[in-house]
Amino acid sequence: MKRFTSLKMTVALVFALAIFGTAAMAQSTAPVEGGAGTPGQQGFRGHHRGGEMGMFLLNKITPALTADQKTQIKAVFAAHSANIRSYMSQLHQLREQYKSATAGGFDEAASTKFHVDSAPIEAKLEGEHAAIQAGINNVLTDEQKTSLANLKAQMQQQMQERRAHWAAQHQGSTTPQQ
């Protein structure tokens, strides 16, 4: 069960990165009608929509990306954005169905149906993310790939340190269930 939860968290993280990256890369500098992607508009937790969230690590690699590389990477994100949006919409609909089916309490049949129905969609999303990563890797030089790998390792280390710090602060603060 822990492996399944870990897989779900990994998939959720991958999707979040893919969605934010896609939104950031697909955004033009002109305001979008309807305001959903208008530059300067606040998104969740105060983050501005359409910033460079998707390019966060890529903007930190050395040597820096060339204008041509940035254009190619934007094209990679754009090529997958429609599929990602479709899959995310399908997952959202399944979650809404699950929420309404379990409004009165836990329903094992509804839970099983949700997980069985959502697994293939999550797998497709993971495939889209892998394709994006492969496309980005094809654009980067060997030196940039090494720099990106080092940045990812550094971020992973920082995440582990934050988790350990959080665990130390919250150790014993929850009541064990009996």
Image (tube, rainbow, N blue to C red):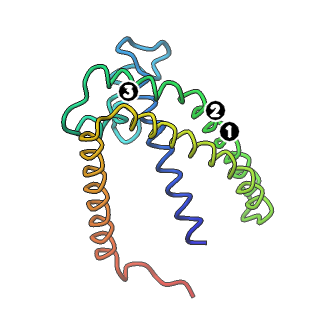
Give the mark nearest the N terminus, 2 or 3: 3
Cβ atoms at labels 1 and 2 below 8 Å apart: yes
Label 1 vs label 3: CA separation? 23 Å
What residue do we see at 53% from left, 52% from top?
Answer: 11
Helix, strand or loop at label 2? It is helix
List x then y, in percent, for residue 171.
Answer: 35, 80
Numbered badge on residue 86: 2
Give the quarter of the figure containing the N terminus. Answer: bottom right
- Residue 88: image quadrant is top right
Which is more toward the observer, 103 or 33?
A: 33
Helix, strand or loop at label 3? It is loop
List x then y, in percent, for residue 18.
Answer: 47, 39
Q: Amino acid at mark 1?
A: Gln
Label 1 environment density (alpha carbons within 10 Å; few <14, some 14–19, many ≥20): some
Give the quarter of the figure containing the C terminus. Answer: bottom right
- Choose mark 2 or mark 3, whichever is in front: 2
Label 3 environment density (alpha carbons within 10 Å; few <14, some 14–19, many ≥20): many
Numbered badge on residue 50: 3
Give the residue at mark 1.
Answer: 90
Q: In the picture provided, is 169 more to the left or to the right than 120?
A: left
Q: Amino acid at mark 2?
A: Ser
Which is more toward the observer, 40 or 119?
A: 119
Position of residue 85 relative to residue 146, above or below, is above
Q: In the picture provided, is 124 more to the left or to the right than 25?
A: right
